[in-house]
């Protein structure tokens, strides 16, 4: 977040959407600092809408309501369609956690229900400056002592006095986090506290090694009008810059209570598409790990099985923040190809749970794979003979008759201008033949082998030629330069897949 000023000047409402047919319920925020308002918006699509009369929301009085409507038009398949939307907004100020209940909305005589929405009320940890301070920065951590691999949340609170009018965008420099991997902290809260606007900037940190670490300060500069500089008309045109720095933080990182592969609270799930396949057809295994903690540095070990070709894709890792904690998911797929029965061995990982330092084991099961070999059929049909001699049944060639067809050619006279045109076109054709190879050589650009491998990998089971090409590409990728690949065939194959 490099430009904090834009965030402060234009506070974007982060909406949580609960949908039903024809109805959409949203709130301005699912987490609000005590004393700040929440807006519930109910949007209905239709011509005749009846909203509920809401005076209280889970014991909290509604302090204001307003309504609005809009229409949109679209032209689809030769027909003009219109959509009319009506929105009603309810404002309330909760002082405790509340649950917005399900409400009934009638649209064109039909009833629709919204889904309940939970609102969490939290207290601000921001320490405001003295009344004379224009703005201030404070930094807080939810933990100051963690294990290696255990995540913590660091929040920077930027407080700006309501009366301050900015003449330039705020310049913000984030803190430094040596020894940690840093993940964006998700939703950034913005709210009012006393005479200040407060903006929270969150960071999720995961320590990579033990030791005592110092988180360096965050810095911010604000530009306000310099009233001592005016133009000839008396208008203020100068800017005065003021700077502030946050405090530092001391974080102690201790060794893991027990050595483990993962730190967090995860579950593992493995799926296999088949345990019985034809020879040289792939068996696909997908492993997914997800839960509370950081998986960005985790790597699933390779499978190495004698007589089996193993392919794998790049791991897909996703992270998100839920209730101030880091949640991750890790997904990786494998393809196994063989012409004999084989076994995919079990895999196990140790997991250390920070809340109770309990060591648990996550396991991917063993899979026994049966490979069905193709049956061999006899190339000819045999019949026993009465004298014990085995004789093949071969049909005698049918007698052929020669049919002579007399070819008749009709000769017509050709005009002289037709001969001249044919000669001219022939010359053009010969010139084009000489020029065309140069164009092909200059414009042809074979596919990158890594890109081609990603495209063809998912179509291995559809075509034996594609399967063979994938094998070659993987061999090249693993360093076997003795494998030769026909670039023309590769390009035609990739083009065919992309066009299908």
Image (cartoon, rainbow, N blue to C red):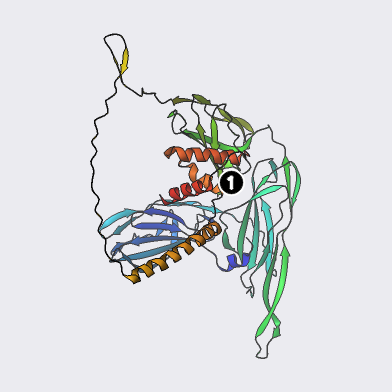
Q: Is residue 144 left or right of residue 77?
A: right
Please provide percent x and percent y for residue 353. 61, 35
Q: Is residue 484 above or below residue 258?
A: below
- From the viewer's side, name the closer residue of 464 and 183: 464
Q: Secondary structure at mark 1?
A: strand
Q: Are there few (<14), some (14-19), or many (20+) residues within 10 Å of tag 1?
A: many
In the picture of the structure, the residue carrying the numbered disc 1 is 326
Q: Is residue 491 above or below residue 353?
A: below
- From the viewer's side, name the closer residue of 398 and 147: 398
Residue found at x 62% / y 73%: 163
Which corner quadrant holds the N terminus? bottom right
Residue found at x 44% / y 63%: 429
Q: Residue furthest top?
A: 387
Q: Is residue 422 above or below residue 187?
A: below
- From the viewer's side, name the closer residue of 247 and 70: 70
Q: Is residue 273 left or right of residue 260?
A: left
Please provide percent x and percent y for residue 42. 39, 60
Please provide percent x and percent y for residue 137. 69, 61
Q: Is residue 65 above or below residue 239?
A: above
Whether residue 438 is visible, yes or no, is yes
Residue found at x 38% / y 64%: 87
Total residue callouts: 1
Please provide percent x and percent y for residue 380. 33, 23
Whether residue 322 is visible, yes or no, is no
Q: Residue furthest bottom?
A: 232
């Amino acid at each position: 977040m490099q430009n904090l000023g834009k965030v402060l000047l234009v506070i974007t409402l982060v909406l949580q959407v609960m949908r039903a047919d024809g109805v959409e319920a949203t709130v301005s925020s699912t987490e609000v600092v005590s004393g700040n308002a929440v807006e519930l918006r109910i949007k209905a699509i239709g011509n005749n809408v009846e909203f509920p009369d809401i005076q209280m929301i889970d014991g909290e009085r509604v302090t204001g309501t307003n309504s609005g409507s809009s229409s949109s038009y679209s032209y689809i398949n030769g027909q003009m369609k219109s959509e009319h939307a009506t929105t009603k907004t309810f404002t309330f100020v909760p002082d405790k956690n509340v649950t917005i209940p399900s409400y009934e909305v009638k649209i064109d005589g039909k009833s629709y229900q919204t889904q309940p929405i939970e609102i969490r009320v939290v207290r601000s940890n921001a320490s405001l400056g003295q009344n004379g301070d224009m703005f201030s920065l404070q930094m807080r951590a939810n933990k100051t002592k963690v294990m290696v691999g255990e995540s913590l949340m660091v929040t920077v609170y930027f407080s700006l006095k309501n009366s301050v009018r900015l003449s330039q965008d705020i310049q913000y420099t984030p803190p430094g986090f040596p020894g940690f991997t840093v993940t964006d902290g998700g939703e950034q809260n913005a709210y009012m506290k006393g005479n200040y606007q407060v903006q929270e900037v969150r960071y999720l940190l995961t320590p990579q090694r033990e030791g005592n670490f110092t988180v360096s300060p965050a810095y911010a500069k604000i530009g306000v009008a310099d009233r001592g500089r005016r133009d000839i008309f008396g208008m203020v045109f100068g800017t005065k810059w003021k700077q502030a720095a946050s405090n530092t933080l001391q974080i102690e990182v201790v060794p893991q209570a027990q050595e483990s592969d993962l730190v967090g609270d995860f579950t593992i799930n493995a799926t296999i598409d088949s345990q019985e396949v034809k020879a040289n057809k792939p068996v696909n295994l997908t492993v997914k790990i997800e839960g509370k903690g950081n998986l960005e540095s985790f790597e699933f070990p390779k499978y190495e099985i004698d007589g089996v070709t193993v392919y794998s894709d790049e791991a897909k890792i996703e992270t998100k923040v839920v209730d101030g904690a880091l949640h991750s998911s890790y997904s990786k797929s494998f393809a196994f190809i063989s012409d004999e029965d084989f076994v995919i061995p079990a895999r196990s990982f140790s997991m250390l749970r920070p809340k109770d330092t309990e060591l648990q084991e996550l396991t991917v099961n063993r899979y026994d794979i049966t490979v069905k070999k193709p049956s061999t059929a006899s190339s000819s049909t045999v019949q026993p003979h009465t004298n014990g001699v085995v004789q093949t049944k071969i049909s005698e060639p049918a007698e052929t008759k020669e049919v002579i067809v007399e070819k008749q050619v009709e000769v017509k006279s050709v005009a002289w201008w037709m001969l001249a045109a044919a000669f001219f076109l022939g010359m053009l054709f010969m010139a084009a033949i000489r020029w065309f190879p140069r164009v092909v050589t200059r414009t042809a650009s074979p596919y990158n082998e890594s890109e081609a491998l990603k495209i063809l990998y998912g179509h291995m089971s559809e075509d034996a030629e594609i399967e063979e090409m994938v094998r070659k590409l993987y061999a090249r990728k693993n360093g076997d330069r003795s494998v030769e690949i026909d670039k023309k065939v590769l390009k035609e194959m990739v083009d065919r897949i992309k066009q299908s």
